[in-house]
Amino acid sequence: MEPNRPFIVKEQPGTKYYCACSKSQNRPWCDGSHKGSGLQPYKVEIEVEKNVAICNCALSANMPFCDGAHKSLR
């Protein structure tokens, strides 16, 4: 996945953990690869089924969600 495009995923209601370290083999979800790094995954409560855009460039001011900041990378 290119860093100038967010991950678009259809999420079901529930608690989600999104990767904050960029090392997960299951991005955008956390797989525990951050252990020992001092970083923690983003914990998000999804209330209703919906599509979400998860930041892939680490520039969003609304992490873990995309705010369009990746457009500055073009």
Image (cartoon, rainbow, N blue to C red):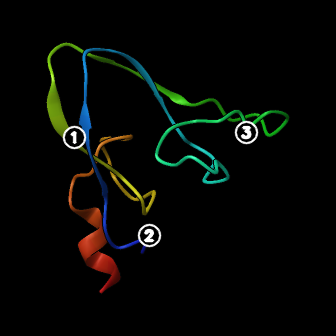
Relative to 14, is 49 above or below?
below
Foreground of the two, 59 or 28? 28
For residue 1, the mark is: 2
Label 1 close to label 3 by CB (< 8 Å):
no
- Disc 2 is placed on an element classified as loop
Measure the C-alpha gap from mark 1 to mark 2.
16 Å
Residue lying at 35% horizontally and 73% vertically, measured from the top left:
4
**Classed neighbour count for the residue bearing mark 3: other residues with Cα under 10 Å, few (<14), some (14–19), many (≥20):** some
Relative to 38, is 8 above or below?
below
**Classed neighbour count for the residue bearing mark 2: other residues with Cα under 10 Å, few (<14), some (14–19), many (≥20):** few
Relative to 58, is 45 above or below?
above
**21 left or right of 52 in image:** right
Q: Earlier in the sequence, mark 1 or mark 3?
A: 3
Report x, y in % for residue 54. Answer: 33, 47
- Disc 1 is placed on an element classified as strand
Residue lying at 56% horizontally and 42% vertically, measured from the top left:
20
Instruction: Inspect the image, locate mark 3, and give the three-letter code of the amino acid beneath it.
Output: His
Instruction: Inspect the image, locate mark 1, and give the three-letter code of the amino acid beneath it.
Output: Val
Q: Earlier in the sequence, mark 3 or mark 2?
A: 2
For residue 52, the mark is: 1
- Disc 3 is placed on an element classified as loop
Quarter placement of the N terminus: bottom left
Residue lying at 29% horizontally and 87% vertically, measured from the top left:
74
Residue 49, quarter of the rendered image: top left
Q: Earlier in the sequence, mark 1 or mark 2?
A: 2
Report x, y in % for residue 64. Answer: 38, 40
For residue 26, the mark is: none
**62 left or right of 38 in image:** left
For residue 34, the mark is: 3
